[in-house]
Amino acid sequence: MGLMYMFPVSEDEQDRIDFVNTGSTKSIVLKTYGLPLVFWGYLIAILAVIGAMYLAVQGPIRKLIETGDSINIYLAYTVQATLIILPLTLIALYFYEKLITKSKESLIITHRVFWIPIWKKVIELKDSDSVEINHFMDSPNVAKMRKDASMKGFENKGYYELYATNSKNQSIFVDRHSRKADMVKMRDLLRKY
């Protein structure tokens, strides 16, 4: 999710980082940033279109239900459910938040929607520095293979994935980002705690 929901990469970003001190244990909590305002404009436009669709099909849906035919009733309720569930799902995506909590050999990944935790994964790390970055490129880098200076801007750079190694030597995916510098800063920040 790091390509869309980005994490802070510096201790200076106090609004998205919490520091927790419990006795001798220090931990850090990284919270993803929300989507930029332009995405909220897209959401309003999408919700307006769905609202217009909902108003436009209410008459035909009522007529389908009044027919009494089970297939027509099923179709009518399916369309109504879709027109209600779709906006709720879109709004939930805008209120999605991912948290990474690191404390010594423990890494906790929490996914929240509307500030309610919906999924939590606890990883017992091999050691406190068991957080690594892997480079991933899913397609051939054709522009780079041509070795043409004019194609430099079109080179596929891929993206970088952050993995944690647990006590059983398994690599567990944590996050990804398109900028290596940000991913390195995030890894170093997690290793400090």
Image (tube, grey):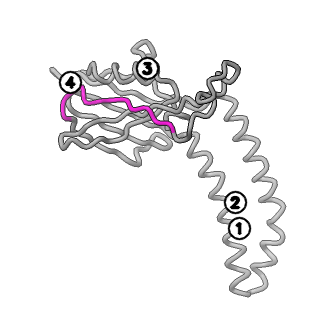
Q: Amino acid at mark 1?
A: Val
Between disc 2 and disc 4, whose residue precedes?
Answer: 4
Left or right relative to 103: residue 160: right
Q: Which residue is mark 2?
A: 83
Mark number displayed over residue 79: 1
Between disc 2 and disc 3, whose residue precedes?
Answer: 3
Left or right relative to 106: residue 30: right
User: Is the residue marked by circle 2 packed among few (<14), some (14-19), or many (20+) residues within 10 Å?
Assistant: some
Q: Nearer the viewer, mark 2 or mark 3?
A: 3
Residue name at image x 47 percent, y 30 percent = 32
Q: Is residue 84 magenta?
A: no
Q: Quadrant of residue 99?
A: top left
Residue name at image x 77 percent, y 53 percent = 51
Give the magenta-colored segment's residue range. Answer: 126-137
Q: Is residue 132 magenta?
A: yes
Q: Which residue is mark 4?
A: 22
Between disc 1 and disc 4, whose residue precedes?
Answer: 4
Whether tag 2 and tag 1 are in contact, CB under 8 A, the answer is: yes
SS for callout 3: loop
Measure the C-alpha gap from mark 2 to mark 3. 39 Å
Q: Which residue is mark 3?
A: 9
Residue 124 x, y percent position in the rendering: 21, 39
Measure the C-alpha gap from mark 2 to mark 4. 47 Å
Whether tag 2 and tag 3 are in contact, CB under 8 A, the answer is: no
Q: Amino acid at mark 2?
A: Leu
